[in-house]
Amino acid sequence: MNEEMSVSVELPEYRSHKVVRAAKITGFRGNGNADMPDLLLGEIGGVVTLLPEWHEKHKPKVGGYYVLYGDGYSSFSPAKAFEDGYTRV
């Protein structure tokens, strides 16, 4: 069981049906603020600048995915979790 939680019952399973926009993070680039380096999305030639609060909350890592949901919310997903749950359209 995951060390972060304790659940006394078996939770029901759910399958995701969301459509998101995402790209693999291939590196970071300094931008003058060490708390908010730009995310390099090398596979698509993109760069994303996010606030320090976003970095603190999501703790992005190279190889994972920057994910943008339809409602404008953005997050980080580890590669395995993202690739196991989403197929490119």
Image: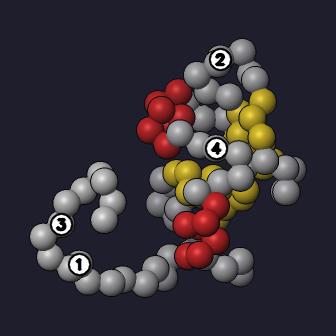
> Image quadrant for the N terminus?
bottom left
Spatial CA distance of label 2 from label 3 is: 40 Å
In the picture, residue 86 is in which quadrant? bottom right
The front one of 31 and 7 is 7
Residue 63 image point, x, y percent: 71, 52
Q: Amino acid at mark 3?
A: Val
In the picture, residue 44 is in which quadrant? bottom right
Label 2, on which residue?
A: 33
Q: Amino acid at mark 4?
A: Lys
Of callouts 1 and 2, the N-terminal one? 1
Quick check: can you spot residue 47?
Answer: no
Q: Residue at x 55, y 66 (%)?
A: 81
Tell which tag, 2 or 3, sits nearer the viewer: 3
Q: What secondary structure is marked by label 3?
A: loop
Q: Residue at x 33, y 84 (%)?
A: 13
Tell which tag, 4 or 3, sits nearer the viewer: 3
- Give left or right: position of 27 versus 78: right
Which label sits on residue 7? 3
Is there CB contact under 8 Å for labels 4 and 2?
no
- Give left or right: position of 70 versus 33: left
Spatial CA distance of label 4 from label 2 is: 17 Å
Tell which tag, 4 or 2, sits nearer the viewer: 4
Q: Residue at x 26, y 83 (%)?
A: 12
Spatial CA distance of label 3 from label 1 is: 8 Å
Q: Residues within 10 Å of mark 4 (few under 14, many from 20)?
A: some
Of callouts 4 and 1, the N-terminal one? 1
The front one of 44 and 63 is 63
Q: What secondary structure is marked by label 2?
A: loop
Label 1, on which residue?
A: 11
Label 4, on which residue?
A: 61
